[in-house]
Image: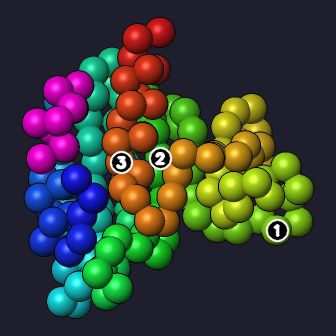
Amino acid sequence: MMPATIADYEVFVYNLSNTFPSILSSTLRVVRTGPAAGQVVGTMIFPNDIRLDVAELVDFDAGRLEILQYGYVVWQGDERLYWYDSQSHPNDPSLAATDPHHKHVPPDIKHRRVPAPRLSFTRPNLPVLIEEVERLLKR
């Protein structure tokens, strides 16, 4: 189901643990900032001390999901494994195909970026991120 309202997105976010049993706990919450807009903030906890920190700005003024900005960070214990952000890097031709969607990866995690073709501003990113964590857990 594609959320069409902020209320739909709240239901989606608050039911992620039911959809993905690998989520041990979640503090994700939708904080409304207007009648059709909000922030999604919090952390999902997975086995093996893995957690996913989430920050999204979402808007439904057009009657459909628009993610205005995001940041997603995956940790294992105190080690930051990788992160995604929506900051554009127009001077990096290797990211042009998915600009501004990209992933920061080791080594030199701050400066090493790779394209993130599965992330979007118009559909929920959380299932993609959770599935990626689940693949990490299977290793």
Q: Quadrant of residue 63?
A: bottom left
Q: Which element carries disc 3, helix, strand or loop?
A: helix
> In this rendering, does residue 70 appear at all?
yes
Q: Residue at x 13, y 71 (%)?
A: 7
Q: Position of residue 120 (x, y in %)?
A: 51, 58
Q: CA distance from mark 3 to mark 2?
A: 12 Å
Three-letter residue code for mark 2: Val
* Residue 40 magenta-highlighted: no
Residue 21 shown left or right of residue 70 in the figure: left
According to the image, what is the colour scheme of the structure? rainbow
Q: Which element carries disc 1, helix, strand or loop?
A: loop
Give the residues in magenta: 15-22
Residue 126 shown left or right of residue 3 in the figure: right
**Dot label at residue 73:** 2
Tag 3 residue: 126
**Figure check: 22 above or below 16:** above
Q: Quadrant of residue 36?
A: bottom left
**Dot label at residue 121:** none
Q: Position of residue 105 (x, y in %)?
A: 67, 37
**Dot label at residue 90:** 1
Q: Residues within 10 Å of mark 2 (few under 14, many from 20)?
A: some
Q: Position of residue 138 (x, y in %)?
A: 40, 11
Q: Which label sits in the foreground, 3 or 2? A: 3
**Figure check: 106 above or below 6:** above
* Residue 20 magenta-highlighted: yes
Q: Position of residue 50 (x, y in %)?
A: 36, 29
Which one is earlier in the sequence, the residue at label 2 or at label 1? 2
Q: CA distance from mark 1 to mark 3?
A: 25 Å
Which one is earlier in the sequence, the residue at label 3 or at label 2? 2
Three-letter residue code for mark 1: Pro
